[in-house]
Image: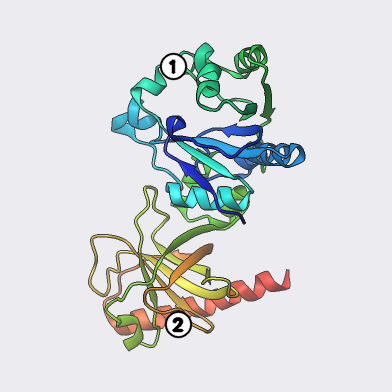
Amino acid sequence: MSALLQFAGLEQARLPAGSLHLAIGMFDGVHLGHQSVIESAVHSARRSGGVAGVLTFWPHPSALFRPDQLTPLLMPMEMKHTVLARLGVEVAIEQNFSREFAAVEARDFVALLQRHLPQLAAIYVGESWRFGRGRQGDVPLLVETARQAGLTVFSAPRLNYNGSPISSSRIRELLVAGDMAEVNAMLGCSYFTTGVVEAGRKLGRTIGFPTLNLAWEPELKPRYGVYAVEVTHGQKPALKGVANYGLRPTVGQTNRPLLEVHLLESPVPTYGDAITVNWLQFLRPESKFDRVEELRRQIEKDRVNALKYFQNTETK
């Protein structure tokens, strides 16, 4: 995986030499439908010896048009960049979705791109992508204005999963419900969290279940509860684990959610280590217990259920 060049807006972009193959979209979650657009740009760039780029936006347009009904993002920008790099994208341009940018006329959009990205050769979008002031631009208009500018446009059809289109909104609903199997199927990879292990209150250690603690509060929070997870640390093999994400109501409820991971195998990362937690299966909702001993017995059951999950997946 090569390093991803990142630029804060079109005006800041300073790209490597070569024809630019640019995928454009919000790409929240970078799900399989998004990947079909992005991978087309990556493959074309590799065939031609060009540069594979992505133009994405922040904040979500709802911040401008529906500030009282904000759409929470599936992924913070740093997570999105991680996935883009995995796909082979070389350049990511994060355009501020400001009132000024939203006011650009659809017919002027391609000219705006060419002004800032003179090596632009081809544009890649989803078939239902809209752009320009009032979302008046569609793919036929993009093709028309791009052709006049000497550019090529590729539009990818929507992908369906179990008979319905894959979409970020559909994945958001499933993540809040804790349906990780469906979430991960449409993402095309495991939903993941990255962070640095923090020192906690060591309560897990006192009841026989030491944990790795990550303070993590994304815009869209997964369902509070217990999950089977895998943890990666550097280039080392993935470690199986069971995690609780929530407010810890039994042992001193917190104001902010905490991700606590109990590993089922060694070696265990330590404080200050950067880790990635891959969320695989929801096991149960977070619960409040009257006594710590009840919590300890439940964690033992969670540990057994997580091991069963891994055994079942390994035999399939």
Residue 157: image location, x then y, percent: 68, 30
Classify 10 Å Cα crowding around label 1: few (below 14), some (14-19), many (20 and above): some
Total marks placed: 2
Relative height, residue 206 to residue 86 (above, below): below
**In-front residue for pair 108/201:** 108
Residue 196 is tagged as none
| Residue at screen point 32% across, 88% down | 206
| Identity, as a three-letter code, of the amino acid under mark 2 | Glu
Residue 282 visible in this rendered orientation of the protein:
no
Residue 220 visible in this rendered orientation of the protein:
yes
Q: Is residue 125 left or right of residue 283?
A: right
Residue 253: image location, x then y, percent: 24, 67
**In-front residue for pair 216/245:** 216
Q: Quadrant of residue 71?
A: top left
Relative height, residue 130 to residue 48 (above, below): above
- Of circles 1 and 2, the one toward us is 1
Residue position marked by numbered label 1 in the rendering: 104
Display colour scheme: rainbow
Residue position marked by numbered label 2 in the rendering: 300
| Residue at screen point 34% across, 32% down | 63
Marks 1 and 2, how far apart at CA: 58 Å
| Residue at screen point 39% across, 29% down | 97
| Identity, as a three-letter code, of the amino acid under mark 1 | Val
Q: Is residue 234 left or right of residue 88?
A: left
